[in-house]
Image (tube, rainbow, N blue to C red):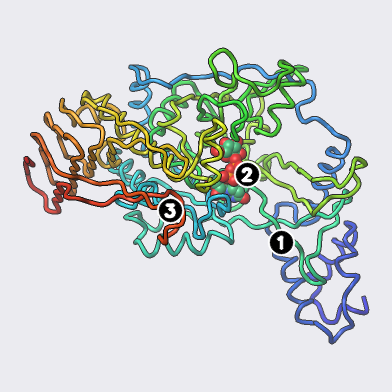
Amino acid sequence: KANWGTISESRQELVAALVAAGQAHLFAGWDEPGTNDEAKAAFLDSLVKINGNYPGGLSGYIANARKLLAESKAGANPFEGLTPEQPEKVDLTSFSEAFEQYEAIGAGKFDKVGVVLVAGGLGERLGYNGIKLDIAVEVLEQTSYLKHYADNLLAMQARSASKRPVPFIIMVSQDTGPKTIESLEANHYFGLRKEQVHILQQELVPAIADNDGALALESAYQLILKPHGHGDIHMLLHTSGVAAKLAAEGIEYFMFIQDTNGPSFNTLPAAIGVSVEHGYDFNSLAIRRKPGEAVGGLARLVGEGREFTLNVEYNQLDPLLRATINPEGDVADETGFSPFPGNCNTLVIKVDSYVRILEASQGIIAEFVNPKYSDETKTAFKKPTRLETMMQDLPKLFGEAEKVGVTIFDRMWSFSPNKNNVADAAAKIASGGPADASATAENDFYGAGRARLEVAGMKVEEAGEKMILGVPFTLGPKVILRPSFAMTLAEGREKVAGGSISGEATLILEGADIKLENVELSGTTGLVVKACEGAKVTVKGKFENEGFELVELGADADVPEYLKIRGYRFENRGAAIFEFDEPGEYTVQP
Ligand code: UGB
């Protein structure tokens, strides 16, 4: 007490509560009054802030930590007594009539959907120094992930009867917040209204030094703080009141997406349709998972009168399978894939059940702790740990009333995150896994465009692959159909009639009112057509030019990071580019 100096009563109360919660060490090493008083005050201010950020305050955090650490020490198996079975699934891995019916239902709900983007992670694995949302998903036109997502929201609202702005919730952290806001402001919110964008900032949580939940100190007047995981989005949607507000305004579904999964919006219409048709409160989008792949496995866990569908994170899947249904663990079945669908962490959640669950749980979603112990007695940690949460764990709070389903899509169409630098990507390719890197993300971006053209009846000749710095890249055709042009397969079919595109050609279409009539693109031809609102453009005939050339850069090229992380760029050698920025009727011919 002698060392407190002059601190306010509310701060003294917090200090007293912390001492009662076994945290006396935080104040034990204090200097005499008069020495370092400013640092002491700043420390207390930081405790007050951290205390306010966590529902239940620091005492709640410490109590949760003790409980979870005791379970971890006892070696409690979170899946004790549960056996994994197949979840309820809708298979949309190929385009079919059913696929298009789901898309039609989903498209009818575009003004009842909010999009939630978790973007608090820094992407250290990627070797990119800015925020991941600023990285280009493709380098023909350098569209950033953030612009790509905003373009999709604009396309959704343009198609809805009410034209209501689609709410866009972005979770940032102190690492990503300032640059995310800078990017939005510098680009006039990419055409979105500022009011439709809700920025929620996740806060760091204190690191924990031991099994008693002692908060770890960086120095005498500073705690060690660490990220709490993407599950914070649920807490923030609750504490900010945004979820309840949007529910009251009539939003029925939230689609949760990650910062660098470009194809998320390919799946949005059909995934919403599936949720509506099957009455899913929680719909996990999935792919056919390669065994050992760093994505969780979705399973129905059954036992002891309990049953729920959940993501089993990739590090827990193998031990669970070994302990239950397969002594060989996380291996392929006769299809060559893991029997459990791979979690893309793209989630469609029904808003009214969500708000109910958030109110009951305060939005704290199934925290877990993963300490690295220094020896078998599990009494000490190698380094301080912390509580974490994952957004896909929400169903842990569901009861019998809530329905969870899984919708499986083709990988190229649905899941191609950009997480790994070129060297790590090449190593992943060498060991037979997906690279999940810039080049593969761009490759799949064009691949989805090709798929849309094929469905529309155009003849698409696919070129071979080239290895660039150890990562495969399909040379083409490179097809970008902007969301303004088509969000569903049916729309592509309405706008494209016949025609053909050769293996190394490029086609970029932007605008709602463009029609292609028997367009032929041969050789390396490039064609870009952009039409503003009100410009009606018909494209016909056979085009021939040098188009865009892929230029390899080599590993040590002195180029900006967004190119370094892929190892190539494109140079325009004479592509035909038509841009219409006045309303009117136009025909484009060679
Ligand atoms: N993120 C945050 O917003 N805040 C955080 O504190 C942490 C992350 P990672 P992870 O889809 O490939 C997940 O780190 O956690 C954002 C699933 O758990 O890239 O290793 C971050 O900005 C896994 O089951 O992923 O693994 C990014 O947008 C599997 O599906 C997102 O959260 C895997 O993703 C994911 O963060 C995958």
Label 3: how many Cα within 10 Å (few below 14, some 14–19, many 20+)? many
The image quadrant where one finds ligand 1 is top right
Q: Nearer the viewer, residue 408 or 44?
A: 408
Is 514 located above or below residue 558 in the figure?
above
| Image quarter (top left, top right, bottom left or bottom right) of the N terminus | bottom right
Q: Position of residue 243 (x, y in %)?
A: 53, 45
Residue drawn 73% across and 25% down? Answer: 320
- Kindly report the distance in space between the C-alpha atoms of the residues bearing marks 2 and 1: 17 Å
Q: Which numbered circle lies on residue 50?
A: 1
- From the image, tell me which residue sits under label 2: 231
- The quadrant in which residue 161 appears is top left
Question: Furthest-top residue in view?
Answer: 334
Q: Residue at x 38, y 34 (%)?
A: 266
| Amino acid type at image mark 2 | Gly
Q: Mark 1: which amino acid?
A: Ile
**Which residue appears at 42% of the width and 43% of the height?**
468
> Marks 3 and 2: in contact by CB < 8 Å?
no
At which x and y percent is residue 79?
75, 27
- Circle 2 sits in a helix, a strand or a loop, which is it? loop
Mark 3 secondary-structure assignment: loop
Q: Note whether residue 236 is visible.
A: no
Density class for disc 2 (Cα within 10 Å; few <14, some 14-19, many ≥20) is: many
N-terminal of the two: label 1 or label 3?
Answer: 1
Judging from the image, what secondary structure is the residue with disc 1 in? Answer: helix
The CA span between labels 1 and 3 is 31 Å
Name the residue carrying label 3. 135
Task: Give, as a three-letter code, the residue at label 3.
Answer: Ile
